[in-house]
Amino acid sequence: MDLSYTETQDMLRDTLARFLADTYDFETRKKMLANPEGRDPGIWKAISSELGLTCAPFAEEYGGMGGGHLENAIMMEELGKVIAVEPWLQTVVIGGGALTAVGGALAAEVIPQIIAGDAIIAFAYAEPQGRYNLADIGTSAKADGAGYVLNGHKAAVYAAPWATHLLVTARTGGSRRERAGVELFLVDAKAAGITMRDYAMVDGFRGAEVYFENVAIPGEALLPGGIDLIERVVDEATVGICAEGTGIARKLLSGTVEYTQQRKQFGQPIGKFQALQHRMADMLVDVEQIASMSLMGTIKLDLPAEQRKAAVSQVKAKVSRSIKAVGQNAIQTHGGIGITMELAIGHYFKRSTMIENQFGPADWHLERYEALTLPA
Amino acid sequence: MDLEFSPEEIAFREEVRTFIAENYPAELRGKQDEGDELSKEDFLSWHRVLAKKGWVAPAWPVEYGGTGWTITQRYIFSEETARADCIRLMPFGLTMVGPVIYTFGTPEQKAHFLPRILSGEDWWCQGYSEPGSGSDLASLRTKAERDGDHYVVNGQKTWTTMAQHADWGFFLVRTNPDAKMQEGISFLLIDMKSPGIEVRPIITLGGEHEVNEVFLDNVRVPVSNRVFEEDKGWTCAKFLLAHERVGIAGVASSKRGVERIRSIASTELEGDKPLLANPFFRRKVAELEMDLAALEFTELRTLSGMAAGHGPGPESSVLKIKGSEIQQRLTELTLEMAGHYGAPYFRSFGEGDNQHAVGPAWANKAAPVYYNARKTTIYGGSNEIQRNIIAKMVLGL
């Protein structure tokens, strides 16, 4: 057992942290979000091809550094610290994770494009009726000769407007909510028959409703593995946003502490008041637990499926609850200014709140944990 | 970074498992199974077995009798002893005054006291709190006045755990009444058989005689029994509290506690279904396991930091807060499981006859244990004091 980071991992963290410190201050981020595209594409290019960070979690056979989940967690945490609207989760953790899991020609083709920063992947899995049930899929993939034809509607797809590829869950057979028959496809985002209604997300990202109308895709687009593969990919993504949440929670706390040392009421800095000190001490306890759970999730991602799912659900349930507490305490401690667009703190809160429910809220994960570990 | 045990660590785990199976005192095991009150000899029987093996103080430096184990080995050892339901060793010598003596003590103090702590020859108690000084420990008034090469100590201590068995006590006393609060305090080692010491029992809500009042009336203490400089005892006190907080998390024993609840709630029926199938009860179990996992990884991160040469610093307050809350929730759930049989009271603590109990044995102790566990968020610096420490020492407020 060993919980220490390697020198290479520390170096990766420092490299990204320094780059983001220079390029991602609050004012610059605000300008990026105001671009028509909602981001500065040069940043993603710099992170990938210039700094070479996207190669960290990939195997050497694809041109990677041979890292994995831990490297992803390190990057997600640092991106969280600046509430970066970069598609690391969707492209590297989810897209890269799915491709790594299946291997083969598709992985050999697309992973190097991810590493180079040329491929951006969006994960089109949610549907308007499905909530967090990954098998509640109405989108159909009908076999058609050697390929498939996609029809359906995917909801609130993060990063879709920027994507070169869509990773799509669709049904090749079975009835709605049946586990069998759900498959994962990697689709060219520009394929004929795909339309998107783009919009801004409340947390600063861009997203879209994605509609598939008789979209013909080749047979090679299928990533074999069915619902088991999809669950694994979503578990990896869940831990990814927990790591992002660690970075965000740390900033919610440090921002709040700084503010209470400057803001004066009743003739003294409000940080001197015990009512607020205890609120912030509770925030620290939650922040530490978020960091601990994020680490536990990262380390346990390669356990056998049942154990992995139980562990990830413990992690996400705890992170959802704790980050809600940290976010709400940060705003309450700031007072009125906390609910304006003016300070960074509110923008951290906007993203942290989305993390609570993304890939399932606390109660959903506790229920999954119970089903896996307690007798019915 | 990984969670896997190496082949050497797995072999070590087997060694510990086998050692416990072959050497845990049978009489002690029997008393634990019956739920009998444990005597001083019972506590010492397991202590002596570990002392003989050289495993009684894993965290101590090797030169003073520690094991030289890695953090992982210490983790394995505490997991295995909890798994096998071994009693917890009394912390007053091993994890409280021992580290103070080897860190701040004179060569003579080290040579005299440390081997006797290891062997179990001396039973220690902690003279910190006073009737007027609880959370505000530094306001303590027990005074020690110099008289030649002795201090003359007068005052009253309270909440002194297991003082009825103690051979020695470590006391915080005021040596300089004119100095600012924390600055006039000294750390004294006092022979509990000294003339002028009186120990009176305090009976707590579960009926236990666990804590005491200790009265000191002109107790003469050699100056050579002062640890560290005169008026600088607060340094020792703070050091001790930070060390105490790490162990206080009680992760391994709480894991064992959850297992016990799972096992009882799987057979205890509500209607025709196990209690564990009740959606509200199972949610509480799931939440407890979730919080315990978070505590375990927070402790592992702290230990890993300590192995790299940091702390244990004020972050250990996080472990104290969450660890104590979880210990309490375990007792709450057990009492809830007990249902009607939470009410009958059959325990005897030294006085009266131990009548034949009714209901399941575990239920019979549920309420006394619940009452007793309220102490966990109060002692070792109340959880509110821990929040003050975090605010001041970690957040810099």
Image (tube, coloured by chain):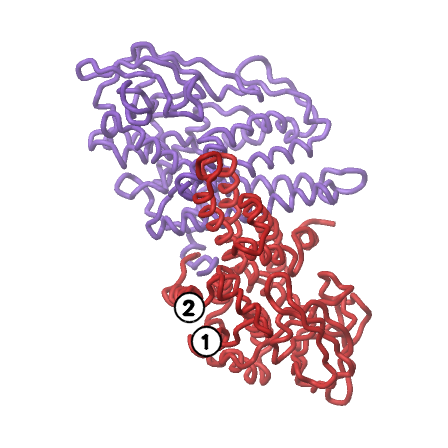
Query: Could you classify mark 2 by the number of other residues whose Cα lies within 10 Å: few (under 14), some (14-19), or many (20 or more)?
Result: some
B3 shown above or below A139: above
Q: Chain of mark 2?
A: A
Please tell me the colour of chain B.
Answer: purple
Q: Which residue occupies 27% across, 29% down?
A: B232
Q: Chain of mark 1?
A: A
* Residue receiving disc 1: A46
B390 shown above or below B357: below
Q: Label 1 near label 2: C-beta < 8 Å?
A: yes
Q: Is residue B23 visible?
A: no
- Per the model, the C-alpha gap separating discs 2 and 1 is 9 Å
Query: Could you classify mark 1 by the number of other residues whose Cα lies within 10 Å: few (under 14), some (14-19), or many (20 or more)?
Result: some
Q: Which residue occupies 54% across, 48% down?
A: B294
| Residue A139: quadrant of the picture | bottom right
Q: Nearer the viewer, residue B176 or B324?
A: B176
Q: Amino acid at mark 2?
A: Phe
Location of residue B136 in the rendering, given as x and y in whole percent from the top left corner: 42, 25
* Residue receiving disc 2: A19
**Secondary structure beneath label 1:** helix
Question: Which numbered disc, 2 or 1, marks the residue that appears first in the sequence?
Answer: 2
Q: Is residue A254 visible?
A: yes
Location of residue B126 in the rendering, given as x and y in whole percent from the top left corner: 38, 25
Please tell me the colour of chain A.
Answer: red
